[in-house]
Image (cartoon, rainbow, N blue to C red):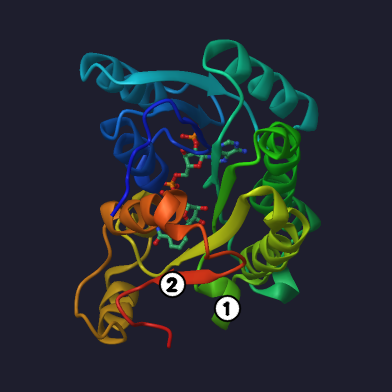
Amino acid sequence: MIMDFKNKNILVTGASRGIGKRIAEAFALQGANVLLNASRESDHFKAALAEFDKAGYSCAGYACDVANTAAVKEMFAFAAEKFGSVDILVNNAGITRDMLLMKMSEDEWDMVLDVNLKGVFNCSKACIRPMMKKRWGRIINISSIIGIIGNAGQVNYAASKAGMIGFSKSVAKEVGKRGITCNVVAPGFIESDMTAALSDELKVKYLESIPVNRFGRASDVAKAVLFLAGDDASFITGQVLNVDGGMVM
Ligand code: NAP
């Protein structure tokens, strides 16, 4: 398998922890230049950057809210100055604000759609022109199986994650001729801060529905992303790859 990411510039949103951090590290280990994004300069973001620096990775960090269009433009300008234009964009930043529809506030709806879906629009738009010029690019969007099957209490999250799928298929059709692919990775239950918040009772219920009988790891998602980013995946676009231990099939 060809996995040469040397001289490739990668931007991973939401890379201060969890899945995004692991994806960023996987690319860095392959010699890529990696820009890590997070919503703010938190202690854990600073710690992640220090850890990457110590490991000798070619990397930098930039904190901004992906839902903020002007801030995203500045982040891509920073990336271009630091490494050159972004070759591989991984839209991973995501949040949940769970509530049943009848009790969900407009703010809870807007917040999740803004970060999870508008963030994908902002970042993808900011990198598409340079990718078209280079006639090579990869956009990989981290959705969720919830965007495929839905979930009670997550109308906002499910809508944002399903929206990413329609978005990705449309981008794939727009830019396929220019050597750019756009795919979706849909994780199932992955151990992270996001899932740590769930009750033990719910975790047992989820485990029973996973054929491989374990929860996923951030590295399981990172491996799928690396595959889709590589030259060996150049004939795969507009697809949704579930990384869920068989939970949804
Ligand atoms: P996590 O541990 O909660 O980390 C979320 C990351 O997103 C953090 O780096 C966070 O930065 C960043 N982020 C949040 N809001 C942002 C904003 N407005 N702008 C920029 N960055 C922002 O989440 P995770 O479990 O690793 O999930 C990563 C992605 O996978 C999400 O899109 C999630 O929906 C998806 N996913 C996760 C699972 C799972 O089981 N864990 C399953 C399916 C899909 P800060 O540190 O600054 O807050």
**Which of these two is toward me, 99 or 188?**
188
Amino acid at circle 1: Ile
Q: Is mark 2 within 8 Å of ligand 1?
A: no
Q: Quickly name the residue at label 1.
A: 148
Q: Residue 152 location in percent, x, y?
A: 58, 79
Image position of 176 with respect to 3: above or below: below
Image position of 153 with respect to 174: above or below: below
Image position of 220 with respect to 8: above or below: below
Q: Secondary structure at mark 1?
A: helix
Q: Residue at x 29, y 59 (%)?
A: 220
Left or right, residue 154 beside residue 45: right
Q: Is mark 1 within 8 Å of ligand 1?
A: no
Q: Are marks 2 and 1 in contact (CB under 8 Å)?
A: yes
Q: Secondary structure at mark 2?
A: strand
Residue 159: numbered disc = none
Instruction: Tell me if residue 67 can be seen.
Output: no
Q: Which residue is at the far top? A: 81
Left or right, residue 153 beside residue 49: right
**Which of these two is toward me, 161 or 125?**
125
Residue 242: numbered disc = 2
Quarter of the image where one finds residue 119: top right
Marked residue nearer the N-terminal end (2 or 1): 1
Amino acid at circle 2: Asn
